[in-house]
Image (cartoon, helix red, strand yellow):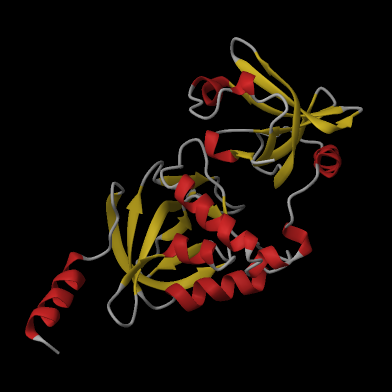
């Protein structure tokens, strides 16, 4: 190998992971993988992969998603990086006193050849995970959505299965009514929905985007509170007639099915 080329490769390796404007966090080695979007470091730190989710439990493609994460990260050195809320704290399990805790991070993995890669990018590109940004964690949602769209178009991984096709408005309304919970609850079902906005109504502190296809009762995308005040997406009042793809928690309020929006990355305006 030429000396200059060799020196350049050494310099590139020395630069480490390209985390951009994310905040550098802890380093460690992955010793365990839970499902397709959670891992554990050798010091016991549990890590939720920020801005994505993967099929879990008995869901279709759950085993394959976990297998992809194991192949990419298990027993490898990683660097955590943060672009939003850094920690999740849950209630202690029955019989335990200490609350459960996990880091919420972007993860950069060092491959066997010494190359660093962004784990979320690889999982989404393979169709092993989908984008799920939140109001307090959305630093790279736009980039991940572009990657997800390519995987979806190519029907890679989970996108080749019928179970992960976006719901129609009618089916989304049914799923919300079946769940019969408030869409702000943590156990509300998360789904991707595609359809057309029939009537976009914007009020002083909230917005309601009523969808075509489910008229009795109507199905709406809703936005309120801080999520409404901090909205930085398309002008909501201009969306009447727009074809959209929305992702979020489904629920019911005053007997009407709805999907709660937290952040503008959850709403994509599609071309006709």
Does residue 190 appear anywhere in the picture? no
Q: Dividing the picture into quarters, in which one does residue 153 lie? A: bottom right
The residue lying at 83 percent from left, 38 percent from top is 173
Give the x, y percent position of residue 21: 28, 46
Which residue sits at x=31%, y=48%? 22
Judged from this view, the residue extending furthest toward the left is 3
Q: Is residue 130 above or below residue 218?
A: below
Quarter of the image that includes the C terminus: top right
- Image height check: is 270 above or below 49? above
Please state which of residues 268 and 223 is positioned toward the viewer in this rendering.
268
Q: What x and y, as percent, mark residue 95?
A: 59, 54
Q: Image check: 49 left or right of 182?
A: left
Residue extending farthest to the bottom is: 1
Q: Where is residue 60? Give x, y as percent.
A: 73, 67
Viewer-side residue, 226 vs 40? 226
Tell me if I can see residue 78 in this picture.
yes
């Amino acid at each position: 190998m030429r000396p200059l080329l060799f020196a350049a490769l050494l310099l590139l390796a020395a630069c480490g992971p390209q985390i951009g404007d994310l905040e550098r966090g802890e380093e460690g080695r992955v010793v365990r993988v839970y499902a397709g979007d959670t891992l554990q470091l050798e010091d016991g730190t549990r890590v939720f992969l920020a801005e994505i989710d993967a099929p879990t439990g008995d869901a279709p493609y759950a085993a394959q998603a976990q297998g992809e994460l194991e192949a990419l990260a298990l027993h490898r050195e990683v660097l955590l990086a943060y672009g939003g809320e850094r920690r999740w704290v849950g209630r202690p399990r029955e019989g335990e006193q200490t609350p459960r805790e996990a880091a919420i991070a972007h993860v950069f993995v060092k491959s066997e050849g010494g190359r660093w890669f962004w784990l979320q990018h690889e999982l989404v590109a393979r169709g092993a995970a989908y984008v799920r940004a939140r109001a307090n964690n959305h630093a790279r949602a736009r980039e991940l959505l572009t990657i997800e769209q390519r995987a979806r178009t190519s029907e890679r991984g989970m996108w080749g299965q019928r179970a992960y096709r976006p719901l129609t408005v009618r089916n989304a309304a049914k799923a919300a009514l079946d769940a019969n919970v408030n869409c702000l609850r943590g156990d509300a079902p998360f789904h991707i929905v595609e359809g057309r906005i029939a009537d976009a109504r914007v009020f002083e502190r909230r917005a309601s985007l009523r969808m075509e296809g489910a008229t009795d009762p109507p199905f709406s995308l809703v936005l309120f509170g801080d999520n409404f005040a901090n909205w930085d997406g398309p002008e909501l009042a201009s969306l009447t007639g727009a074809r959209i793809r929305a992702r979020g928690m489904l629920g019911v309020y005053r007997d009407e099915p709805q999907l709660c929006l937290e952040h503008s990355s959850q709403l994509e305006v599609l071309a006709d």
